[in-house]
Image (cartoon, rainbow, N blue to C red):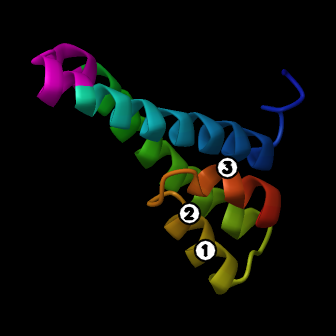
Amino acid sequence: MSDLIKTPLGRFRLVAFLEGLSYLLLGFTMVLKYQYAMPLPNRIVGMAHGVLFVAYVFLLIQVSLEYQWKFKKVILAFLASLIPFGTFYAEKKIY
């Protein structure tokens, strides 16, 4: 695990995984909020997802500059964060 966070790309990949996971959890907590009137889990996961999304974008910028990624690759990595399961797919195909 410590080897994963030693490089900017490793940190980016970790945050990408966590961001994707939080996106999926957000869908689950939406059901809790609207079907079972339990808004607290949605609020907590929503805040975590927002923080992870911002971290993802900042790390994407850092990694793209440091590794001199082409613009198309950066755009695809960004778009992957907007689609459920997108960061998991991008993990295998883009990074």
Q: Which amino acid does label 3 sit on?
A: Phe
Q: Earlier in the sequence, mark 3 or mark 1?
A: 1
Q: In which quarter of the image is residue 21?
A: top right
Front of the two marks 3 and 1: 3
Do the residues bearing badges 2 and 3 touch, measured as CB atoms within 8 Å? no
Residue at 75% x, 63% y: name it: 66
Q: Which of marks 2 and 3 is nearer the N terminus?
A: 2
Which residue is labeled 2 in the image?
Answer: 80
Bounds of the magenta span? 32-43
Point out residue 83 in the picture as x, y percentages from the top left corner: 47, 59
What mark, if any, has residue 88 been given in the picture? Answer: 3
In the image, residue 35 sits, relative to residue 62, either above or below, namely: above
Do the residues bearing badges 1 and 2 touch, measured as CB atoms within 8 Å? yes
Seen from the viewer's position, the closer of residues 55 and 19 is 19
Q: Is residue 40 magenta?
A: yes
Which residue is labeled 1 in the image?
Answer: 76
Seen from the viewer's position, the closer of residues 38 and 17 is 38
Q: What residue type is labelled 1?
A: Leu
Label 2 to label 3: alpha-carbon separation: 8 Å
Q: Residue furthest right?
A: 3
Label 3 to label 1: alpha-carbon separation: 13 Å
Question: Relative to 25, is 43 on the left or the right?
Answer: left
Point out residue 16 in the picture as x, y percentages from the top left corner: 62, 45
Q: Does the magenta stretch include residue 94?
A: no
Residue at 84% x, 21% y: name it: 1
Point out residue 48 in the picture as x, y percentages from the top left corner: 38, 28
Do the residues bearing badges 3 and 1 touch, measured as CB atoms within 8 Å? no
Q: Which amino acid does label 2 sit on?
A: Ala
In the image, residue 29 sits, relative to residue 36, either above or below, namely: below
Label 1 to label 2: alpha-carbon separation: 6 Å
Seen from the viewer's position, the closer of residues 4 and 68 is 4
